[in-house]
Amino acid sequence: MTAGVTESAAVSVESLAQTYDLTLTSTSVSASVESSGGSSRGGGMSGMGGGMSGMGGMGSMPGGGMGSMGSTSVSTQSESSAVALVVDQVCITEGQTVKKGDVLMTITQESIDEARAALTEAVEDAELALKQAQIEENETRLSAQYDYDTRMTEGQNALAVYNAAMNEIAQNISDLETQIAECTDEKQLASLRSQLSSAKSSRTADELAAKQTYEEALMYYENAQDLYDVSVNDVGASSEEAQEAVDAAQADLAAFEDYINDGSIRAEYSGTVTGVGYASGDTLTADTAIAEFADAESITVTVSVTEDDIAAVHLDDTVEVSFLSYPDEVFSGYVSGIGSSSTSGNSATVSYPVTVVVTSVPDMLLSGMTANVTFITKQVRDVLYVSNKAITTEGADSYVIRKKKDGSEERIRVGIGFSNGSIAEIEGVSEGDTLLIKGKVS
């Protein structure tokens, strides 16, 4: 038996919306190689002029420089879009009570197959781009290693090549002078003298070109490691980017398979269905909720308690709740908040808002239904009780009228204990006895 302060107010039921949130990122991926740098080291000593046209071989001095450097780039283009799934059958109606995990609707197999094919193709494209990036980056490493080895070899041989070039310049002039001294043919002699004059005229330029080539070879030799590092600096970044695209595509496919599962969409919440967003043949979109629910776990009642009774209310107190729609049942709840601001309305009575969370509810409860909240001030358990209407009082004594098995009546004196105003604790009768309530009939 319970006694307490009872107040009434409308039930507030939180509305929950289950949305179509299978929004995946579609990414197109491609890998390509871009050349960087150019021929930075000319054609060796080919600029030494006609005086050395018969020397040959000297054009093999280091050339090409960093012309073989390249970089691999991965181009990605992402676009977020919802997977187009088409509703086959809707399995719920408004007012229906569902539990988390219940089937809300089924999806057409055709739309599932099309979505799965598109997502699988995206995975395959991303994996292909990854392989391409890995191949091209490996080629970049090999090219950079070849350039490094070439620069090291050319640098190590630079002095010998330089000395050979200088010797050839001097030897060419010496040979021409010897040929002139021994020549008796005037026509040939004129040609040799012309060659000698040209060789002497270009000697300074040829020697300068040889020295420049020598210094360039040394420079590239000394910086071979740095140039190698520059060439391979970004190697691996493209593969990482391509791998990220693969991971994203695979995650999208996995999310799709997990979401669609057995071809049905299941409830994410428990509660009463208050709205259904789709019919058979509709395409799911992120803009329209699949279903809306009255959340069975978020039901509150906010009542006004007068200042005379507020002292009986405490946070986390257990309360009893009844609903006009279910008059014969009593449910439970607890006090979740007591407002500090008071209201008096048009009367002098001051009241405070008290919020109660209802923890047990009937099968169907909608927002706006009327609830009676009883803040318990006294409670007794395991006692016999009877309606106060069955008790008559004469002075200090209390009586009830009990119906006997043969249909006759007997008046019994009883003891009355705790009463909450509508029922009272009673002694002197047994559980199951039939007590009569006498009324006046005119």
Image: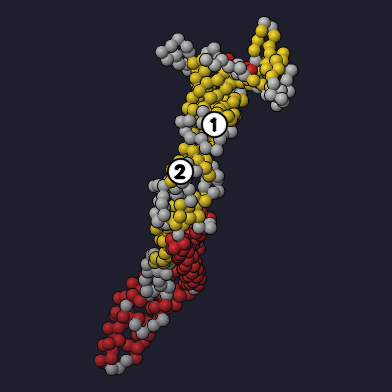
Residue 410 shows in the view: yes
Q: Secondary structure at mark 1?
A: strand
Pointer 2: residues within 10 angstroms few (<14), some, or many (20+)? Answer: few
Identify which residue is drawn at 67% across, 17% down: 401
Left or right, 428 with reference to 361:
right
**In the rendered image, the vertical position of residue 91 relative to residue 46, given as above or below:** above
Identify which residue is drawn at 54% across, 31% down: 326
Identify residue type, mark 1: Tyr
Residue 230 location in percent, x, y?
Answer: 46, 61
**In the rendered image, the vertical position of residue 339 relative to residue 233, given as above or below:** above
Q: Secondary structure at mark 2?
A: loop
Q: CA distance from mark 1 to mark 2?
A: 20 Å
Identify residue type, mark 2: Glu
Q: Which residue matches tag 2?
A: 94
Residue 130 location in percent, x, y?
Answer: 48, 65
Q: Which label belongs to residue 326?
A: 1
Left or right, 188 with reference to 333:
left
Pointer 1: residues within 10 angstroms few (<14), some, or many (20+)? Answer: few
Give the quadrant of residue 389.
top right
Tag 1 and tag 2, C-beta contact below 8 Å: no
